[in-house]
Image (cartoon, rainbow, N blue to C red):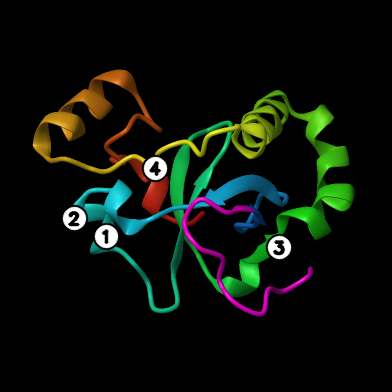
Amino acid sequence: MTELERVPPPGALVWAKVRGFPFWPARMAAESEVSPTVRATKPPGGNLVLFFGSLDYWWVEQAQLCDWAVGYGKHARGCSKRKLMKAGLDQALQWKGSKRKMVLPVWKGEEEEEAAAVEGPGASGGGGDENTES
């Protein structure tokens, strides 16, 4: 793993690793994207990422992050074997190739959290299992 010297800013593409999964395409997320309930679960040294494909938010340590460009050649090869991971890579490349920077979502309160529960995991509110590690 290529450990980063510093944590990238929100919006930066990275490869992130959680126990039980391979490195996965992700982007650094701002804490303002998730509910106060999710923010309250931040572990010491936790950095918020949004995993492409599943659109789950997750807290990871700096040691679990790999630079996008450095990790691309190594980790992108495995993406074709998993449908969700392939979709995640496609989403990450779309994010990277966007001529105008996509606006990071901002959690706005209970109404969005209720909408997220109806729409399923990864919807804009950030409720569900995105803040627990397996």
The CA span between labels 4 and 2 is: 17 Å
Q: Looking at the image, is mark 1 or mark 4 earlier in the sequence?
A: 1
Mark 3 touching mark 4, by CB under 8 A?
no
Residue 48 found in image quarter: bottom left
Tell me where the magenta segment starts and ends, as one range. Answer: 1-13
Residue 91 found in image quarter: top right
The CA span between labels 1 and 3 is: 23 Å
The tag on residue 36 is 2
- The quarter of the image holding the N terminus is bottom right
The CA span between labels 1 and 2 is: 5 Å
Q: Residues within 10 Å of mark 4 (few under 14, many from 20)?
A: few
**What amino acid type is highlighted by mark number 2?**
Pro
Q: Looking at the image, is mark 2 or mark 3 earlier in the sequence?
A: 2
Q: Eyeballing the image, is 102 above or below 22?
A: above
Q: Residue sitting at 82 percent across and 59 percent down?
A: 70
The CA span between labels 1 and 4 is: 16 Å
The tag on residue 66 is 3
Q: Residues within 10 Å of mark 3 (few under 14, many from 20)?
A: many
Q: Which residue is mark 4?
A: 104
The mark lying in front, picked from 1 and 4, is 4
The mark lying in front, picked from 3 and 4, is 4
Q: What is the magenta segment's predominant secondary structure?
A: loop
Q: Residue sitting at 55 percent across and 49 percent down?
A: 27
Mark 1 touching mark 2, by CB under 8 A?
yes
Seen in the image, is 99 located left or right of residue 42? right
Q: Residue sitting at 33 percent across and 67 percent down?
A: 42
**What amino acid type is highlighted by mark number 3?**
Cys
The CA span between labels 3 and 4 is: 21 Å
User: Is 41 part of what is drawn in magenta?
Assistant: no
Mark 1 touching mark 4, by CB under 8 A?
no
Q: Which residue is mark 1?
A: 39
Q: Position of residue 58 (x, y in %)?
A: 45, 53
